[in-house]
Amino acid sequence: MDIDQKLTKLDFSNKDHPDPLILNKYINLEELNCSNSNLTYLDVSGCTKLAYINASHNRISKIFVNNEGLKYLNLLDNNFPEQDLTMFSELVNLKELHIGNVDNDKEGDVYNRFHGSLEPLKDLNNLENLSINNTDVDSGLEHLPTSVKILRCLADKPNVKVKSLNMQLENFVFDVKDVIQGKYNLKAWRKNWNLENDKENLQNQINSHQRQMEELASNEKEYLKFQQVELEKEEKDLRARQEEIKLEKSRLEQEVKILRQQVESLKTDLVRINAIYQSNEKKIYEMESKLATFTADQYTDKARLQDEINALIDDLTVKDKEKMSLESEIKRTNQKLEDKKDEIEELEGKLNEVSKSISNLKNKKDELNQLKEDFNNKLYGSKVSTANLRKQMENLKTDIRSKSKELSNQLEEQKKIKDKLVEARRNAETIQEEKDQMENDLESYCKKEKNFQDNLANLTTKLEDKEVLINKLQEEKRQQVNELKGRLGEIKDLYPQIETKELELKELIDTVRTELSKKRKPMLEKLLEEQKKSIEINEINGNSDSEELKYYSEQISSELDDIQILLSKQKEVIQLKIQLRQKFEAHASQVNPS
C-alpha cells in the first residue's frame, strides 16, 4: 500500500504549499490542517474519511468537499466570493463551522463574502459551534438548529450585514464577554422569536379581522343603502299605481252612474211603451166594436179596414219583438252594471293591498335602519374586543397560539351567524309574503261571496217580476190575437172580396216596412189614397162613415211608428228575460255545481 494512502493526519500549517492543493489520493485522511498556507484552491473530494479540516487564514475561493462525515470545518479569513450558505447544507454531521472574518489586518479586498440567510444550515442537527463574524449573513436565526450553543456574529467591520443578527441577540447574554465568545441564550431568543412571530401572526390576524370587519361593514352599508333605494323606488311605484287605481275607480264610478241613468231611461221608455200598447189595444177594441155596427153596404169598407187592423196586428207582433229586444238590452245593461261593480270592488281590494304593501315597506325600512344600527354596534364591539386583545397580549404571550385559534373560531362563528341571519331574513320575508297573500285572498273571497249572494237575490227578484209582467203581457196579447183571428175568419167567410184586398194591403205593408225609415210619410199618403178610392166606391153610405173611416186611417198612420217601437221594445224585454234567466242559472251553478 502507498504511504500516502496510509496517512490519517496531515499538517502543513504556516507553510507555503504549492497551489492549488489537491489531496484526493489520501483516501484514509481524517484530519487536515493547512491554515495560513497562502492557498487559493482546495480539493479534498476524494478524502471520504475526513472529519477535521482547518483551512483558515488563506486566500481560498474554491473548495471541494464531499464527505458527510465531516465534523469540523474552519474557513476563517479566506476569499470566498459572494454566495449563500447552500454549499454547507449537505454536511449534516458538522459540529463546528467557522466561515467568518476575524483578521482585521488582512488586505481589504480579501475576505469571505458569505451572505443571505442561515436557512441552508437548518438540517445540520449536530452543529454546536458556528462563526459568521463580519459576514453579510443577516437573517434566518429561526432556522438555526437547536443544537447550536455558540454563535459568533461580531460586526467589527463597517457596513457588514451580520450586525442585524448581532443586534437581535444582544439582549440574550449575561455578560459582555459572552458576546465575544458567542455564548448567547439562543433558547431564550428562539422562545422570544416564537412569541414575536406568534404576536406578528396574531397581529396580522387582528388586522385581517379588522379589514374584514371594515369590508363587511362597508358591504353591509352598501347593501342597506341599496335596499333602501329599492324600497323607496318600490314605494314610489306603488304610490303611482295607487293613483292610477284611484283614477280608474273614478272613471268606473262615472260609467256606472251613466249606466244607471240609461237603465232609468230604459225603464221610463218601457213604461211609456206599455202605456202606448194599452192605448192601441183600446183603440183596436173600439175599431172592432165599430166594425160590428157597419151595415151590409159598408162591408167592403169594413173588410178594407179589417185588413188595416190585421196589418196593425202584424205591426204589434213586430213591436212585441222590439219589446223583447228592449228587455234584453235592459238585462245587458244590468249585467254591465254588475260587472262594473265587481271591477270597483276588485280595485278597492287592490287599493287595500297597495296600502298594506306601503305599510310593509315602511316597516321594512325601519327594520333595515335597525339592522344597520345593530350592525354598527356589533362592529364597535368587535373593535373594542380587538383593543382588549391587544392590551392583554403582552401579559399572555404564552397563550397567544390558543388565543389565535379562539379568534379564528370566533370569525368562523361570526360568519355562520351572519349566514343564519341572512337566511332568517329571507324566511321571514317569505312567510310575511305568504301571510299577506292568504289574508288578501280570504278578504277577496268573502267580498265576492257577499256580492254574489246580494246579486243573486236581486236577480231572482227582478226575474220573478219580469216573468210576471211578461207572462201578463203575453197572455193579454195572445187573447187579443185569438179574438182578432176569430173575427177575421168570420169576415173572410162573409166577404170573399177580402182576399184580393188583403193581398194588396200586405204588399203595401211590406213596402212600408222596408222603406219606413226613409219614405214613411209618402207611403202613408199612398195608403190613404188607396183607402180613399175604396171609400169613394161606397159613398152611398154617407159622408159621416167616410169621414169616420178617414179619421181612423189617419189615427192608424200616426200611431204606426209607436206600434213599431212598442213591438221592438217588447222583443227587447223578452231577450232581457232570457239573459236574466241565463245569468241566474250561471250564478246558481256556481253556488251549487252539483
Image: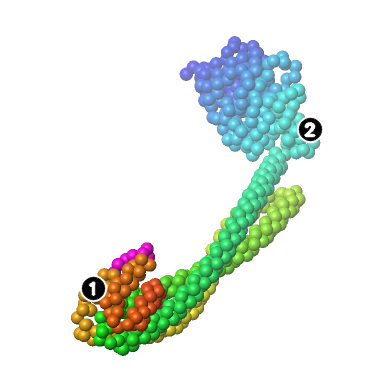
Q: Which residue is mark 1?
A: 503
**Cα–Cα span, label 2 and label 1:** 156 Å
In depth, the one of 241 and 355 nearer the eye is: 241
| Res 492 quadrant in image | bottom left
User: Is 242 placed above or below 113 here?
Assistant: below
In depth, the one of 179 and 553 nearer the eye is: 553
Q: Secondary structure at mark 1?
A: helix
Q: Main secondary structure of the magenta part?
A: helix
Q: Residue at x 67, y 44 (%)?
A: 204
Q: Residue at x 66, y 30 (%)?
A: 130
Q: Residue furthest right?
A: 176
In depth, the one of 15 and 173 nearer the eye is: 173
**Residue 159 position in % (x across, y down):** 74, 23
In depth, the one of 488 and 20 nearer the eye is: 488
User: Is 375 placed above or below 25 here?
Assistant: below
Q: Secondary structure at mark 2?
A: helix
Q: Which residues are magenta?
A: 509-519
Quadrant in which the C terminus is drawn? bottom left
Nearest to N terminus: mark 2 or mark 1: 2
**Residue 265 position in % (x across, y down):** 49, 73
Q: Residue at x 75, y 33 (%)?
A: 167
- Residue 521 on the magenta span: no
Mark 2 neighbour density, 10 Å: few (under 14) some (14–19) many (20 or more): few
Q: Residue at x 51, y 18 (%)?
A: 25
Mark 1 neighbour density, 10 Å: few (under 14) some (14–19) many (20 or more): few
| Res 240 quadrant in image | bottom right
Looking at the image, residue 269 sits to the left or right of residue 52; the answer is: left
User: Is 392 placed above or below 59 here?
Assistant: below
Q: Which mark is residue 177?
A: 2
